[in-house]
Image (tube, rainbow, N blue to C red):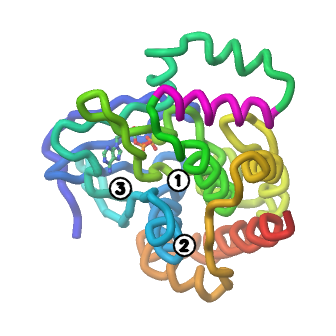
Amino acid sequence: MTVKFATNDKIAETSSKGNQEKWRDNGRWYKLDQFGYEALAETVISRLLERSSIETETPFRFVRYQMERMNVHGRERNGCSSADFLLPGESIITLAHLFKRFDQSLKEKLTRLPSDKQRIAYLANAAAELTSLSAFPQYLTMLFEVDGLFLNDDRHLNNIAVLEKNGRYDYCPIFDNGAGLLSNTQMAPMDIEPAALVRSAKARPFQTTFNRQIIHARNLFGPQLRMPKLTESDIIEELHEPLQYYAERDRGIITDRVCQTILLRQKQQSQE
Ligand SMILES: Nc1ncnc2c1ncn2[C@@H]1O[C@H](COP(=O)(O)OP(=O)(O)O)[C@@H](O)[C@H]1O
Ligand SMILES: [Mg+2]
């Protein structure tokens, strides 16, 4: 099915790597592929997260994404959609906004701290204090574990958020994993070995390695994410439908990149 957009309402959102064009329509958010196969990454990651402990054993949630073919300004484009997770009267406050509102010296404080571990502790505890969300450090740790497993290198402070309604806060479902799985084929070109790309990737928001970010957060707040061991055939099963949206010549190489990324990261994360 092709979704047609009659409007030109483009929502601008600051992201470290530019903005994926997106629309809200009929209770769903739609966003277009920008640098590669972001929609496939969103869809596959959210399907694999269904196998995790997130919604069965923790108070946290994640956004479900599905593939879409969209006709935008007369052109067929790939993208994904997700149900709007905001309840009536609720708003999303990204950490960038939260700190702009309440703690303008955050950046300065973070740069003054001498280690990544202290920066992670500061960010987690400051957000918990400002929002009274006492499990925010665990939420952040889980987010880092999810990012590490899927190599999402775009977890800047606008991709971490809380929900607010009448001055009360809640945990935001984990959203925007679209930069994972080497989806940005401009930054991570198709002709470079996936293993080399995985090795050189850096985690946000602290620009350290994924392993270090996870080790520090787990040492501080305990491991959070439980995920059964994923096999190549588990990943291929979830890839099957989303791959149909992409050119046939790219399907093999996308499969290889996605499988290698998850299997390599899974191995590294379990050794920690
Ligand atoms: N399912 C959703 N429900 C509510 N708001 C959403 C949803 N998806 C996106 N948004 C809004 O759009 C913003 C950007 O979404 P995001 O997935 O981070 O896109 P991008 O990849 O362009 O950064 C979010 O901060 C939020 O305000
Ligand atoms: Mg984003």
- In the rendered view of the protein, which quadrant contains the C terminus? bottom right
Q: Nearer the viewer, residue 136 or 15?
A: 136
Q: Secondary structure at mark 1?
A: loop
95 left or right, relative to 194: left
Sequence-wise, the earlier of marks 2 and 1 is 2
Q: Residue furthest bottom?
A: 233
- Dots 3 and 2: beta carbons under 8 Å? no
184 left or right, relative to 202: left
- Dots 2 and 1: beta carbons under 8 Å? no
Q: Position of residue 144 (x, y in %)?
A: 65, 50
- Foreground mark, 2 or 1, reads 2
Give the main secondary structure, helix, strand or loop, of the magenta stretch.
helix
Q: Is mark 3 within 8 Å of ligand 1?
A: no
Sequence-wise, the earlier of marks 3 and 1 is 3
Q: Nearer the viewer, residue 221 or 36?
A: 221
Whether 141 is drawn above or below 106: the answer is below
Report the residue marked by disc 2.
52
Mark 1 crowd level (few <14, some 14–19, many ≥20, 10 Å Cα)? many
Report the residue marked by disc 1.
177
Report the residue marked by disc 3.
77
Q: Secondary structure at mark 2?
A: loop
- Foreground mark, 3 or 2, reads 2
- Dots 3 and 1: beta carbons under 8 Å? no
> Which quadrant of the frame does ligand 1 lie within?
top left
Q: Position of residue 140 (x, y in %)?
A: 59, 46
Alpha-carbon span between mark 2 and mark 1: 15 Å
Alpha-carbon span between mark 3 and mark 1: 19 Å
Q: Which residues are magenta?
A: 116-130
